[in-house]
Image (tube, grey):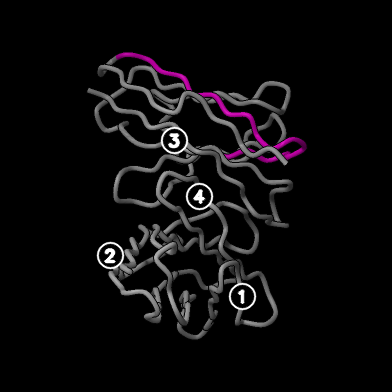
Amino acid sequence: EAGVAQSPRYKIIEKRQSVAFWCNPISGHATLYWYQQILGQGPKLLIQFQNNGVVDDSQLPKDRFSAERLKGVDSTLKIQPAKLEDSAVYLCASSSMGGVFSHEQYFGPGTRLTVT
Amino acid sequence: AQSVSQHNHHVILSEAASLELGCNYSYGGTVNLFWYVQYPGQHLQLLLKYFSGDPLVKGIKGFEAEFIKSKFSFNLRKPSVQWSDTAEYFCAVNAGNTDKLIFGTGTRLQVFP
């Protein structure tokens, strides 16, 4: 079974530039998550999709971050414009189900973003 | 709000030593509990999980964890660590009615031969 794929693996940008990350979940997984992991901290959920609908985006800084999951499969996370404090690893995860019946989340390798 | 505390930020052990990593959470209702591991250069992967039933759960690679509801704890243990256990370990929790994971800050384990 192929795992969660993410690209790019690394990205360096200057502040005020924009950047986009891509995630392809495990085939058949309905639920997709984006996490932000700042150095020295645990992952923090940014947004959760169930198929192509948003379940939870309460911690997404909506003035600069946006995410979409067209057709309920792949997802992109965008930052525009980036700030220095956005430097982090952005993790994508997927699970077969979501909601009340919580299932294991499978994580991708992450995208390491450095904002200079 | 839910939170997870991992008090050991960096643990250094010799091979064959016993390991116990602490994890405490704050939430009064039903919870699901997880330990994830991240080996150097690899992605996060699940070590073990507790949803219900026997509070002593066994995971991969000889790890186990015990859920003590009265102490709001889910400590990770291994009787004898190996060099290959060098990694970062994250405790995570979600409330019983949601699958949003709240992670602790992680514990970096270094095992020396």
Q: Amino acid at mark 3?
A: Tyr
Label 4 sits on what residue type? Leu
Circles 4 and 2 on the same chain: yes
The chain under label 3 reads A
Q: Chain of mark 1?
A: B
Dots 2 and 3 on the same chain? no
Circle 3 residue = A90
Residue labelled with disc 1:
B58
Residue type (three-letter) at the residue carrying disc 2? His
Give residue B8's position: percent from left, percent from top: 30, 69
Q: Which mark is residue B10?
A: 2
Label 1, label 2: how far apart the Cα atoms are: 23 Å
Q: Identify the residue at the far right of this view.
A: A28
The answer to whether residue B35 is above or below residue A89 is below
Q: Whole-Å distance between the Cαs marked 4 and 1?
A: 18 Å
Residue A4 colored in magenta in the image? no
What residue is shown with label 4?
Answer: B44
Residue shown at 59%/24% (left/top)? A68
Q: Report if the CB atoms under discs 1 and 2 are less than 8 Å apart.
A: no
